[in-house]
Amino acid sequence: MTMRFALPFVLLALAGTAPAQTPQSDSPAASGTIEPDGTVHVPGFRLPPSIYLSEAAKKALPRTPTDPEEPMMRAVAAGQAGALRQRMPQLVAPRIGALKAMYKVTTREEQVAGIAAVRATPAAGIAPGNRGKILLNLPGGGFIMGVAGGTGMMESIPLAGLAGVEILSITYRQAPETIWPAATEDVTKVYRELLKSYQPQDIGIFGCSAGGLLTAEAIAWLIHEKLPLPGAIGIFCASGDARWGGDSQSFARPFQALPPRDDVRAYFKGIDRSDPLVSPALSPATLKLFPPTLLITGTRAFEMSATVNTHRELVKAGVDADLHMWDGLGHAFFYDPALPESREAFDVMTAFFRDRLKLAR
C-alpha cells in the first residue's frame, strides 16, 4: 500500500459488474479499460482548478510537477534523516516567525517526560477560562521529519492564537532510527505527565499527516492502557488507518502530474498494519470508545479516502465525529497561511475544540 506523507511547504524548503472495455484509440479522449476484478485503467484527462477554490489558492497551485517528498526520501537513503530533522526548525524559521507575528503567539522550548517539546502560548496571555486546559500537538512529517519546532509550530501557532489556549507540541521518536510503537509510547509518556496537571476532559490531542494517524493510534493505546481519554481529538490530513488505502491513494500523485508510487514507511516496516493499535479504524470495538473527533482533508489529498472511511466508521460506532473537506486542495493544505481556506480550516478547528473542551472566548 502507498504510504505517503507529503508536506509540500516544509519539504520544498529543503531543496463493479461491467464487462471489460477496449479503448478505441490512443488519444487522450479514448476510453479506458476495466479488468475482471474491477480495476480501471484511467485514460489521460485534464484536471482544471476547482471552481470552489479561492483565487489565492488557484494562484498557489503548482505550475510544474514537483515531488515534495523527494528531499525527505533522499535524506533517508543517504542516512542523513536524523541530521536533517535537527535542522528543520532553522529551515522553516522564517515561516514560523511570520506565523507568530500573524497570530500573536510566543513559543518556548522545554522537555516533558524527557521528550523535546515546544509550547505555544497566546502573547496576550491565556484566556482566564482556559488556564486549566491544553492541547497536545503531534507534528506531521512522515514519521521521519516531525519536529515540534518545525511542522509542529505550523500546526499549533494559528490554533493557539485563535482559540486562546496553550498548545504543547512534541518531537516523538521516528524512523529510520525506530519503528512502531516508539512514537505512541512517547505520546503516552507526555500524556501521563499532562494528567498530573490537567483533567483528561480538559486535554485535546491533534496532529496533521503522520501526526494525525499518530493521534488515532495514541487513543487506541490509551484505551489499551486503560488511561482516561482526552476530551477531544483532531485527525487532520490523515485517518485512523495506517494502510492509507482507497481511491485517493491511487489518484493523488497523478493529480499532481506525478507517477504513482507504492511504498511502506520505514516506521511500519515489518508491522501488521491491521492491528487495532496501528489502524484503529479497523476495530469497531476500539472506535466506539473514541472521544469527539474532528477530521480534515482535501479532495486531492492522498489520505482523502482513508479519512472519509475513518469518519464513516466512527459514525457507525456512535462517536461524535465531524468531517470537513476542501474541494480541489491537497495534503496539509493549511500549511500555507496565505490561503483563505487555511484560515477557514483553523476556524473549524477552533470552533470544534472550543465546543468540545468548553474553551473560553
Image (tube, helix red, strand yellow):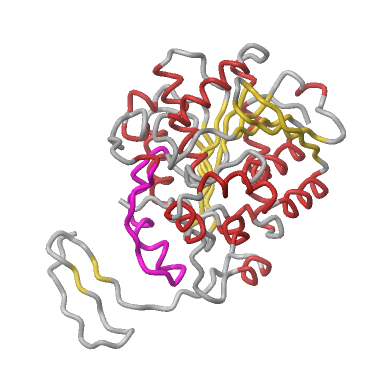
Q: Nearer the viewer, residue 74 or 200?
A: 74
* Main SS, magenta residues: loop
Q: Residue at x 37, y 69 (%)?
A: 259
Q: Is residue 91 above or below residue 214?
A: below
Region in magenta: 240-266
Tell whether 136 sits left or right of 274.
Answer: right
Residue 17 picture quarter? bottom left
Q: How many marks?
A: 0
Q: Image point 61% across, 58% down: which residue? A: 9
Q: Is residue 299 magenta?
A: no
Q: Pinpoint residue 208: horizontal percent, then vertical percent.
A: 54, 43
Which quadrant would residue 122 be assigned to in this image?
A: top right
Q: Position of residue 30 (x, y in %)?
A: 27, 83
Q: Quadrant of the C terminus?
A: top right
Pinpoint residue 128: horizontal percent, then vertical percent.
82, 22
Residue 255 within the magenta-colored segment of the rendering? yes
Query: Furthest-right residue in view?
Result: 124
Q: Is residue 152 above or below residue 202?
A: below
- Residue at (60, 20) in percent of width and height: 113
Where residue 151 appears, x then y in whole percent?
62, 46
Q: Tell me: residue 200, above or below residue 153.
A: above
